Image (tube, rainbow, N blue to C red):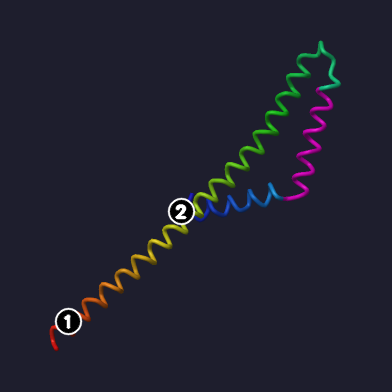
Amino acid sequence: MTPEQVSQLGQQAAQVLDNPAYQRAFKLMREEIVGAWSGADVRDQAGQQLLLQQMKVLGRLQETLASVMKAGEDVDKLLERHQRDSEQDINESRTRHGMRAVGRALRRA
């Protein structure tokens, strides 16, 4: 995957995490699982285990989206730094070229 693709996925993950519909659905799912868990029969270990797994999957989804978003942010920072460094190298090269031209002009004078 290219850095640009990682950046784009990170932006898309941020859009999902910031989306009010996603936030509402996530909250409702969490509340539903907690409600079912708190109302589950103590002897229903299989049902409790299933609810625990659902809660873990829900949390993992959130963590994965956050991780993709963070990776995109990190790549964006690296791309920005690379762009700045490239521009600085170009400016330094132009300055050295200009200084050589001045030196040649002074030697001719």
**Magenta segment includes 14:** no
For badge 1, the amino acid type reads Arg
- The residue depicted at 77 percent of the width and 14 percent of the height is 45
Left-right relation of 62 to 28: left
Task: Select label 2 or label 1 by which is in front.
Answer: 1
x%, y% of residue 33?
79, 29
**In the displayed structure, does residue 42 sit left or right of residue 57?**
right
Left or right, 10 with respect to 18, comes to left
Q: Compared to 86, does 8 lie above or below?
A: above
Tell me the residue that label 2 is attached to.
78
Query: How far, Cα to Cα, is label 2 from label 1?
Result: 39 Å
Q: Main secondary structure of the magenta part?
A: helix
Q: Secondary structure at mark 1?
A: helix
Whether residue 91 is situated above or below residue 34 in the rendered picture? below
Magenta-drawn segment: 19-37
Query: In the image, what residue occupies the spot 46% across and 57% down?
Result: 79
Q: Which mark is residue 7?
A: none
Q: Which residue is mark 1?
A: 104
Q: Position of residue 89 (x, y in %)?
A: 34, 65
Disc 2 or 1, which lies upstream in sequence?
2
Write the residue at 81% across / 14% down: 44
- Residue in front for this viewpoint, 108 or 22: 108
